[in-house]
Amino acid sequence: MTCILNLGGTYLVAALRARGHRVFSAGLDRGCDMFLKHPLPARTLLARLEADGVRPDAALYADNGNLPFVIGMESLPFPSMFYSIDTFCNPWHVPFAAAFDLVFVAQKDYVPLFRREGHESRWLPLFFTRRPDCGAQDPALFARRDVPVAFVGTLRPRNIPDRLPFLQRFRKAHPLVFMQGDYAPLFSRARIVLNQTAASEVNFRCFEAMSFGAALLMEQCANGLEELFTPGETILPVYPRGDAGAAAAIAEQWLARPDRLAAVARAGQELVLERHGPDQRAGEVADAAANLVAGRAHLARIQDMTRRRHIVSTAYGIIGAELVDPEKARLREFFLALHADHAPDRTA
């Protein structure tokens, strides 16, 4: 089986291990096999892996919202993959992808951005990360759910200033329980889970709500929503983005038809548990890794190192330009210095 170096998010580690692969995780999370306190060069990471007796066949850099913490990914002497999740709020992901042999993109509409830059890219939708112990399969159990409509998520995110006003408008039109924190207790009790996104993305909450047996009430959304789910069958009819009144009306209509509501919740849960869990995504990642290893895909990247380093320098420049908070001045200087170091010599 393949030895995979997992960098960043650990959401696929357990599933990859369950498939028989050896997975060594490294990142800024203390739960990783190798906890990294700060960014470090790829050569330093490789030396530490060698000292620990870890010899990866391939690497997966799994986006978890952090800035790059391994510098020089383009130099890894084995195939590498990047899973870009929050592309919509991290434009640096596109040039950063030049450091890898394959890019998985969670939001379908962003795949062309990577392909236009010449990156080998494919759509890999998100999934539920936590297997529930409740279900919608039994209509009697669904009928016992005591929360008609629920929302769980950050209530005042910087990139979604309209979220709290939207939830408040919904609650004026129809009862709604909303909160931050652990979604599981509330999703287990909810008949309908309301979702609202940052940029019309198909986010983790879609899959999490459905896996816990609630009917998903989602806004009109691109990024493959209606390729993954069928409104009126596996999710509720979608509402116009930002229209809290329309969303509340849909919830009221479907709550008045409990049998049909239970059927949608049940069909959605069955679909997600069958096709959209960490096991399925780990299988796709593992198959891709095996193909990259067999094809020695990293050799073409290494031969193209100079050009790729120049492209990756753009990612560092974008990050540095966006770090305008005075408290992040040192981080800004770090990435701008990386940009200058990796950029081509304009005087040559």
Image (cartoon, helix red, strand yellow):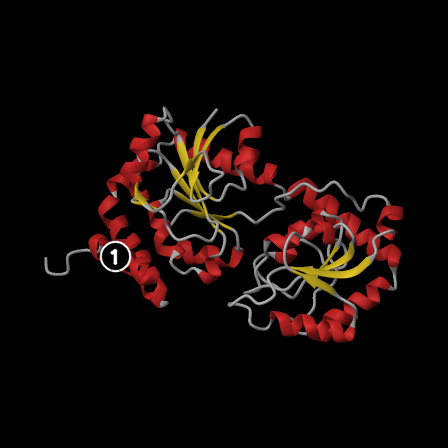
In the image, what residue occupies the spot 66% across and 50% down?
208
Q: Quadrant of residue 59?
A: top left
Task: Provide residue 185's location: percent of width, then percent of height.
Answer: 72, 50
Task: Provide residue 112's location: percent of width, then percent of height.
Answer: 45, 57
Vertical order, 140 against 110 (above or below): above
- Report if residue 46 is visible in the image: yes
Number of marks in the image?
1
Residue at the farthest front position: 327
Secondary structure beneath dot 1 equals: helix
| Image position of 92 (left or right of 234) | left
Q: Amino acid at mark 1?
A: His
In the image, what residue occupies the spot 79% across and 71% down?
174
Front-lying residue, 179 or 78: 179
**Residue named by callout 1:** 339
Q: Quadrant of the C terminus?
A: bottom left
- Report if residue 242 is visible in the image: no
Residue at the farthest left position: 348
Task: Provide residue 169's location: percent of width, then percent of height.
Answer: 70, 75
Task: Provide residue 64's location: percent of width, then percent of height.
Answer: 48, 50
Q: Quadrant of residue 270?
A: top right
Please tell me how crowded label 1 is: few (under 14), some (14-19), or many (20+) other residues with Cα within 10 Å. Answer: many
| Image position of 289 (left or right of 175) | left
Vertical order, 316 against 298 (above or below): below
In the image, what residue occupies the spot 20% across and 53% down?
341
